[in-house]
Image (spheres, rainbow, N blue to C red):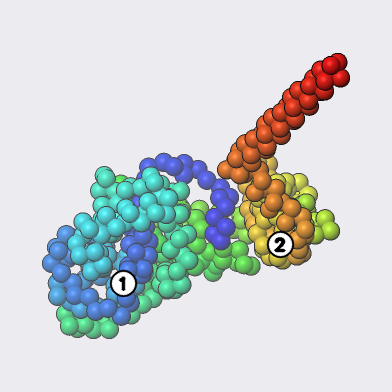
Amino acid sequence: MNTGKVLYSKNEKAKMYPASTTKILTGIIALEKGTLSDVVVATQEAIEPITLEHSQMGVRVGEELTLEQLLYGMLVYSANDAANVIAVHIAGSLDAFAQMMNDKAKELGAADSHFVNAHGFHDADHYTTASDLAAIARYAMKNEKFREIVSTKTYRIPPTNKYDEERVLSNTNHLISRYRVTSLYYEYATGIKTGHTDESGDCLVASATKDDINLLSVLLKCENENTRDKAYSFTDTVALFEHVFDNYKYHEIASVGDVVADSKVYEAKDGIRVTLTPEQSIETLLPNDTDIETISAETTLNNQIAAPIRKGDVLGSIQYTLDGDVLATANLIAVNDVERDAVIHAIHIVLNILLNPFVLIPLIGIILLLIYVNVNRRKRRRSRRSKLSYTNSRRRRR
């Protein structure tokens, strides 16, 4: 998940209905646009569309809840009413929030998605792809509060102005919470969100961490059954995670200080060259038996590397590939300082001035004019000498 590298995909660009995994996008927008301590009043516009078919936590019109409580209700308990209340609070209306969702999706590169509501209840015009949903989820998981919420097993909301009892909300993600189904619990799971409608099937966007390996998976349109072995959105997710944890590890393919290139430096004092190294160490997740000697590295240097250079200056980039797949890209920085030769630099300045067309053309004109004047002078001198010689010759004859 850290690198965004795709280890396995199937039909990742196929149009799918996301159901409640939609709430990942709703949640990150709310976290970025709102304040957790805001007291939000549930409006008629938000609550009226929520019918008995919807997953809900029983929010009532006029009820006061904090934005934080609503986010837990939406992301942990999958409450559609909480999603709508959040949407109206953040954007002013449900339609305006849907537009915010589409704008954010576009910003994140989710170009094959379209959202019409904040919760994912089925609408034929509300769709995404596994690839888009992975991009959205990966972005959301960079937010610390989002990670905290989606990894919560149980959340409690005390009585409110409209509700006399404490609400106890258990996570719908069986990989996280044992409350409903104990057998699907997965100790390495860290989130994220379930989803289900008749049209979408069972959906699960999940994350897991083990030995510093952070993974993200997206499974859409599964056909779960109420048995341990046939809860496919969960069991297949765990199978994918376990396969990677067992068969992949991080390989260091570059370290800061590794000399990967050197270059001649324009106007360098004493002709000193600059040595280049990656700006940061690079690790990438690859199969355990990968021979890193088979990884190719291609460097691209700046068009002109000129003195003075200071250690740490970015002078190019390096790209690592394996079997045609790009593994990583990094800046190349200078390992050593390179001073400029003042004399050579001064000569180049003079030459650049002289070779400037605005200087060179008039200068050539002046030179040609001087040559012309000089030639004419010589011609006139020769002419006078010739006349003088002729006069003297006639005098001698007389």
Are discs 2 and 1 less than 8 Å apart at CB?
Answer: no
Residue 255 or 192: which is nearer the viewer?
255
Instruction: State which mark lies toward you, 2 or 1.
Output: 2
What amino acid type is highlighted by mark number 2? Answer: Ile
Question: Is 322 located above or below residue 180 in the figure?
Answer: above
Query: Taking the image as drawn, is residue 15 in sight?
Result: yes
Residue 276 or 304: which is nearer the viewer?
304
Query: Taking the image as drawn, is residue 151 in sight?
Result: no
Q: Which mark is residue 309?
A: 2
Which residue ends up furthest to the right in the rendered image?
396
**For numbered disc 1, what is the local secondary structure?**
loop
Q: Residue at position x 78%, y 25% from top?
A: 388
Q: Image quarter for residue 158?
A: bottom left
Residue 265 x %, y % = 75, 54
Residue 393 or 339: which is nearer the viewer?
393
Question: Is 293 located above or below residue 370 in the figure?
Answer: below
Q: Which mark is residue 34?
A: 1
What amino acid type is highlighted by mark number 1? Answer: Gly
Q: Residue at position x 37%, y 51% from top?
A: 106
Q: Residue at position x 26%, y 52% from top?
A: 116
